[in-house]
Amino acid sequence: MTTSQQDQSTAAPPQPWSKPAWATLLCALTCGTLLIHGYHPLAEDGGLYVAGIQYTLDPSLFPHYTEFVREHLRFSLFAPVISAAVHLTHLSLLWVLFLLDILSIWLTLFSARQILRRVLPSAPSAAPFAGVALLAAWWTMPIAGTSLLLMDPYLTARSFSTPLSLLAIAYALDDAYARAGLCIALAALLHPLMAAYALAFLIVLHLSRVTRSLKARILSWLTLTFAALVLAALLQSLAPPESSAFRAAAITRYYWFLSQWQWYERLGLLGPLVILAGILYLRRGKLSENAITLCHTCLVLATIATLIAILFAHESSTIHLVARLQVLRVYMLLYAIMTILLGATFYQTGKRPYLAAAAILAMAAIMFYVQRQSFLLSPQVEFPWHPDSNPNPWVQAFVWARHNTPSDALFALDAKYVNTDGEDAQTFRATALRSALPDYSKDGGEASITPALAPLWQQAADAQKDLSQLTDATRDARLRPFGVTWMVLHANAQTAHLCPYANRTVKVCRLTP
């Protein structure tokens, strides 16, 4: 043996990174995640949550169709907590949202690192860092066809229920079930449905840990699968009848039904399972018991959720209770775990570590490009110190409406305005602070889970269908029965009504008597 070989064989293993080093890296990743994936506080579901917070802060807002603003407040403490933060800090709501979004990014990355510490106890620190870095790179990756992202570029209840769920998994790997239970309880206060699926994850994880032999594990998994299918069947059979309006709202949520997914969306269910199975195979004999258990838990839970969706979530059914539970949302946790394990494994198995870094940076660049295309006319990061500076023409029209129309005004927009090219899914209510008729897309989501809202939603969405393409006579006949006083129309819409604001894309018009 040569001297160099002796030196290599007796070399000390690499020392783990210190806590200050990890803290610095997590802060850097947090800033990178924000810049790569952007921040759009009033877009998509972020706007729905913000409208609820605005109403909690000032109940005089949104005097018309208020139920579509406050309905989701019944199930979550998210809005009251954010409102309390505004009162305590004396900061504006936009500042509080921005700071909490940064905190949620850091907490998610921290929770991912806690899991990797437990599944890679002897790996060099660079391996778990690669896993966390890949999570940051894939932050806004779509979750199969569930209409969810791994994490959102805005603040919602999921922004905290997800890291709390991941932290609960980390504690469960230590058998610290009291801490895990506390994390699940906190998550349930913010997002009960996602917390329920995190609890299901912990149940499968516990069964996998307490049964040592593979035969006993398989038996416990089969028993749990059977119990879950029986429970789903009971829920479906005991559910009350649905009205035609409620069924119409349910059917608009295509992502509830596997049969309506595109082929590539269905591959999104299979992909994580193939990767996890590949990790089990390629790293056999080298994985810790915690890593094996975690992979098994993901595979079992994905199988149960997919079976339930296949058997009970059908658009042709007269009852859609199981479909409304959206059991495939459990894939959000599966994607997160798959991502961090994939990143760490890629680093460990590669002969040239710098290739892992290059690959993660390339993926981050791709995600940056995708996010820019998704929010093409909005800034990449909508900072709170310039709240009305978004150059998006739709946002500019909404801002004008906030400053120049009465607080009790009721607006009508095209039913699918948030899906219009260039609109960037920016929401009207949260931006304009004005009431609006329920729209097809976002308010349809509320109607699909709340039977009492379905008739109102169906009538209003039908009245606003193709609004800018109608004549004044047809448009007025549709909108006047609802008490509409203002409209947001496309710039090329033909109307004799006074339109005191217009830009190259849209105009704001008054529905005169």
Image (cartoon, rainbow, N blue to C red):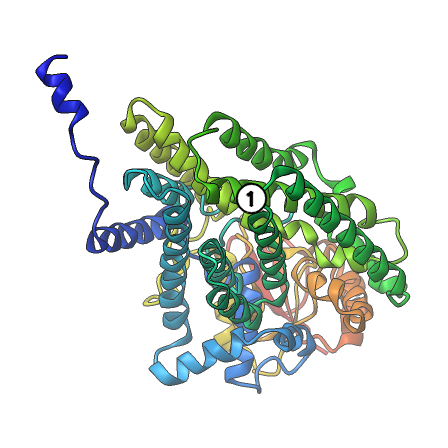
| Residue at image location 42% in from the left, 31% down from the top | 286
Percent x, y of residue 203: 61, 56
Farthest residue in the left direction? Answer: 3
The quarter in which the C terminus is drawn is bottom right
What residue would you read off at disc 1?
142
Q: Is residue 223 visible?
A: yes
Percent x, y of residue 459: 81, 67
The quarter in which the N terminus is drawn is top left
Q: Is residue 420 visible?
A: no
SS under mark 1: loop
In the displayed structure image, the side of residue 153 where residue 511 appears, left or right:
right
| Residue at image location 39% in from the left, 46% down from the top | 116
Percent x, y of residue 320: 82, 57
In the image, what residue type sits under mark 1? Answer: Pro
Q: Nearer the viewer, residue 362 or 334?
A: 334
Farthest residue in the top direction? Answer: 1
| Residue at image location 52% in from the left, 73% down from the top | 78
Q: Is residue 52 above or below residue 507?
A: below
| Residue at image location 31% in from the left, 26% down from the top | 355
How many numbered tags mark residues here?
A: 1
Mark 1: few/some/many CA within 10 Å (<14, 14-19, 20+): some
Q: Nearer the viewer, residue 122 or 129?
A: 122
Percent x, y of residue 251: 80, 53
In the displayed structure image, the side of residue 361 where residue 488 appears, left or right:
right
In the displayed structure image, the side of residue 139 where residue 274 appears, left or right:
right
Q: Nearer the viewer, residue 95 or 129?
A: 129
